[in-house]
Each structure stands twice: as C-alpha cells, then as structure tokens.
Image (cartoon, helix red, strand yellow):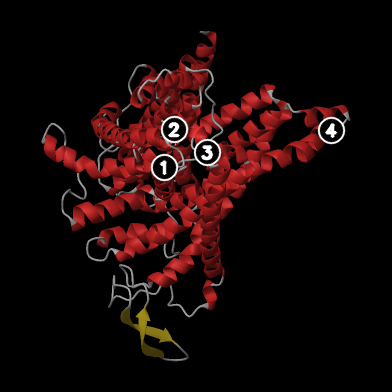
Amino acid sequence: MSALGKRALHLFLVVFAASSVTFLMVDLLPGDAAYQIAGDTATLEDVQAIREELGLNRSLVLRYMNWLADVARGDLGVSYLTREPVREAIMARLPVTIELMIAAQLIALVLSVPAGIYSGYRPRSCIDRILGSTSFAVMSIPVFVMALVLIYLFALKLGWLPATGYVPLSADPVANIRSMLLPALSIALVEWVPLMRVLRSDMIDTLHEDYILMARSKGLPTHTILFRHALRPSLFTLVTLFGIQVGHLIGGALIVETIFALPGIGRLLIGAIFSRDIIVVQGCILFIAVAYVAVNFLVDISYTLLDPRIRRGGGGWLTAPHIR
Amino acid sequence: MNPPSEIPPAAGRKSFSEALGESFWLSAIWLVCVIFFAVTADLWPLAEYDHMNWESPAAPPGTEIHAEIPGGGRPVEMKKVSLLGTDTMGRDILARLIFGARTSLAIGLVTPCIGMVIGGLLGMMAGFYRGRTEAVIVAVMDVILAFPGLVFLLAITFILGPGLDHIILALGLLTIPAFTRVARANTLRCARLEFVQSARMLGQSDIGILVQEILPNVIWPMIVYALLVVSYMIVAEGALSFLGLGVPAPTPSWGAMIAEGKEVLDKAPHVSLIPAMVMFLTVLSFNIMGDCLRRAVHPKEEQL
C-alpha cells in the first residue's frame, strides 16, 4: 500500500507541476484573450475594460490560485471567448476522441494479435519475414501520410467513404461509423506494428518455457497450447504498450483530428491555444495530464500485479518522444 | 509442431544478416544522396524555390512551363521542363524538395544532439549518484513527459519568434527525457559491474569514472536511440506543418509541402504525394540503419 500510495502522490505532483508550468507558459505568450474578444477594431480602452471584467489584470499567482480553488470544487471555469463552461466543452468533445481511440485500438488489436501469435510461433518463416519487413516499412509512414493516402484511395478514387467531417453517433449511426473509419484506420495502421512486434518477441520467449514443452509432450493440440497456455503470459508487454497508446490517444489524436476535421479534445486544445483562451487550455491540459497519469498508474499496477518479471522501459518503443 | 529451436540458428542468422546488409547499404546510399543534394543545393541549375508561377499552378510532373529568368537588365523569357511539376502556387517541386531537405535534415540531425548531450549528462548523473540527485532528475523528466509538447513548442515560437532555429531548440529540449531514460538505464546497468568498482578502488575520481568507464558503455545505446529520434523528428516537423506551426514560409520543408498539397489531393495528388514519398524513404532509411546498428550493439537481441 505504501509503495502504491507513494506512486499516487508522485503522480499527483506530476499533474500539479504540469498544470503550473502550463499556466506560466500560456501567460508568457504575447497577447491575451482580451485582444481576441475585442477584435481588430477595438481601442486600447476596450481591451482594458475586458481585462478588468475577466480579472486578467490580477497577478499570475492570484489567478492561478483562483483557478486551483475552483478546480478543487470541480469547476474548470468558463471559456473567455465562447462563455461555454470548460467542463462541458471537454465533455462535448470527449465522445469523439473516445470513439476514435476505441475504433483505432480495436483495429490495431485485430491486426496485431493474430500476426504476433503466428510470427512468434513460426519465427523466420516466410510469413514472419514478410510481416517483419512490412512492419518496418509501415513503421516509417508518418500518420499524416497514412491519412492522406487513405483519403486519396478510399475517399477520392474509390469514393467509398467521406474524406472529412463528423456525424454524431446519435444522429446517424451508419454515417457516424463511415466518418470514423478512415481516421481510425490511419491511426491503427501505424500503431499495430509495435504491438505485433512486442507480442512476437514475448511469444518466442514463452514458447521456450518448460511448461510449454510439457504441454507439447502431453500431446496437446497446437491451438490449445498457443491460445490457452502461451498467449496469456505473453500479453504483458502488449498490455503495457497498449496502455501507453491509449494514454496518448485520450489527449486527442491532434493530427488525425485536424486532417479529418473531427471535433475532438485535440482540436479543442489547439484552437484554445491559438486564441489564448487560457482557461480552456488549462482545462484540457489538466484533463490530458490526469488521463495520461491515470493510464500510467493502471499500467504500473498491472506490472506489479500480473508479472514481476516484466522488463520496464529500456525499449525504444516505450520511451519514444512524441508530440501531443 | 516444430519448436522454434529446431531451426538451425547459424544458417538462419547468416542469410538474415546478408539481407540486412543489403538494405543497410541501400538506405545509406539514399541518405548520402539526400545529404549530398541538400549540401550542394545552390550549385544545381534549379528553379528558384520561392518563385511563384501563377500561370501553371499544380502542374503535373514533366510539364513544360514558362520561366522568367532575371538576367542582366531585362528578364529573359524561356521554356523549361518542370521535372516533378509545380505546387499549388506554381513553385517548382524539385527545387523545393532539394532545399526542403536542408530544413528536414537540420531538424532531424540537430535535435537529437541537443537531447543526447543534456539528457545523456542528466541520465548518467542520475544513474551514478542515485539518491536525491536521481529522484529530482526523474521527477523533472516526468513533469516534462506529462506536459504537452505542443504548448511548449508554441510558447517557444511565440516568445522567441517563429523560425527554424527555435523549432529545433524546442524539439531538442523535448527529446531530453527520453535520452535521460536511456542513459540512466545503461548507467545503472554498468555502474554495478566489476570494472567500475575496481576503478573506484584504484582511487579514480567520480568524473574520471563517469568519463572513462561509464561513458563508453552508455554512448552506443544513445547513438542507436538517436537514429530513431532522427526519424521521429523529421516526422514531427511534418506534424507541426499540418497544425500550422511549422517552419515559416517561404522556407521550404517536406512537411509543409505535404500539408499544402492536401488541398489539391483530388486533382493533383503529386503535390503532396511526391514529398510524402521522399519523407517516407528518408525515415525508412534512418530506421533501417538504426536497426542494423542496434543489432550490432546487442547481438543477443538478434534472435528476436
């Protein structure tokens, strides 16, 4: 418990520090929301009046303290520009982001698990080599290139799916799935590769264990050995990596949301940054940091609960720098 | 069911390394070409990369276009074949690709150096001294990781002004945590080994041990990781261009070319697909070379 509590405290401090640094940084950006609200024709007095009204004249520390106090009460504030409560703004965008994440990760799992099992079961076989070199090539395709190629093929050439736009699930389920398919595929076709590779290498390790030899010598059929005995203990690194990917996608897949014009968390954040809507930026970053840290926390728990032998970090996949 | 161990490892490994060798050299050739053209870009008879020709926007590859060459007093009209066509503003794609290689390579090659020097130093200190030093360094890195890099990038470009050098600085600082992790993990691994203990018994100073004993064991994994970061950063530049945060015009960059071409994807797909292809081949080459080096550094992992 104490180790877990320590970890939780550490993660809390990380979230706190991230939000403080954000507040400071967004404040350092020249120009503030008052200019944005006042518009191009406003006089300096107008801007001053708006500042007065929003409390932008108060000191940075004071504003941050106020914001923290509000957050502690569960109130993320109100957008300077649209007057929309930030919590509602995030909640309105969340379904899009979550749906995209689930769809992308489902496709990635469907592709990576069978491929990983087979490659691990027959390493150096013909299919394994083909998968190995394809995965290497796919790994080098940036997600925006993947998105453009998919749009070109399936929306422009074949005309099967819409190129951009979003239809809410409640409005038209079929149109919703059609509008989500290309964005989800763009992410999944890039993300399934690392999942397959870790599953393959763990599968190879597991198949060398004594109990697999035992099962084999008892004459159990191959599929029983693979799915009943070998798969579960080989899943840990995959689960870890999967968690990390989910952690990133909860913050919104910025590039994909931008290319496909999906109203998700990522677009909310970037729009708010451009218009200096500091309250919305703060809200989004708090949400992203908490979600990221929560997923990491779950992954940490699964490490210690599931299998103490799991290697931590080290691999390039897990420590890759990313732009969110 | 054949157990995997039945495959003769020696034979498999040989053909594997032969195949790898080929791809390694192919990638090396591609990268040498890209670097060569980027360095000598000024010497080729290329169209000006920022010359807009509104008569022939988004012309397909091989189109003959009118070019106005400012020579002496009056401009000379002449016809010229645009090898790869023109972009949405009628600028020559080949010229922009070659000059854009400078931008992409500058971002790809300089950023990992920033991360490697600072992150390597911090990681080695964390792994060597442990205790409070380590706790502080790890905590700071966690904060950087939990903090969205995009806000940081925006802050840097807004405070220092937009520009290639500021993007490089911001991206470089963002790679520090990852390099710190790699350096720390490898320092932890070898700080316990006998040669470090014996160096200490011989009375070597901390700095002496860090530089002479630990650095040679940490530097290779870092270089291997840096090659991976190179491709991440080339891609990151493209991502930033899509968000409207890339290298400011008129400096050409591959990412900006791909992003601009998105608008005419249905009528003139080459505008964004040609630079996309070049970026893909470059990233692939860096990945292949990084992978080959990794195998050379950790021969044990080769079986996987």
Position of residue B211 measured from the top left corner of the image (x, y, whole percent) = 77, 40
Name the residue that disc number 3 marks: A316
Name the residue that disc number 2 marks: B2
Q: Secondary structure at mark 1?
A: helix
Name the residue that disc number 4 marks: B205
- Left/right placement of residue B41 relative to residue A129 reads right
| Closer to the camera in the image, B191 or A193 | A193
- Above or below for A319 versus B243: above
Dot 4 and dot 1 within a common chain? no
Mark toward the viewer: 4 or 1: 1
- Above or below for B69 versus A91: below
Dot 2 and dot 1 within a common chain? no
Q: CA distance from mark 4 to mark 1?
A: 50 Å
**Other residues around mark 4 within 10 Å, as few (<14) / some (14–19) / many (≥20):** few
Residue at the image point whose x is 53% and y is 52% from the top? B20
Position of residue B108 measured from the top left corner of the image (x, y, whole percent) = 53, 53
Location of residue A227 (image quadrant):
top left
Tag of residue A264? none
Tag of residue A128? 1
Mark toward the viewer: 2 or 3: 2
Q: Amino acid at mark 2?
A: Asn
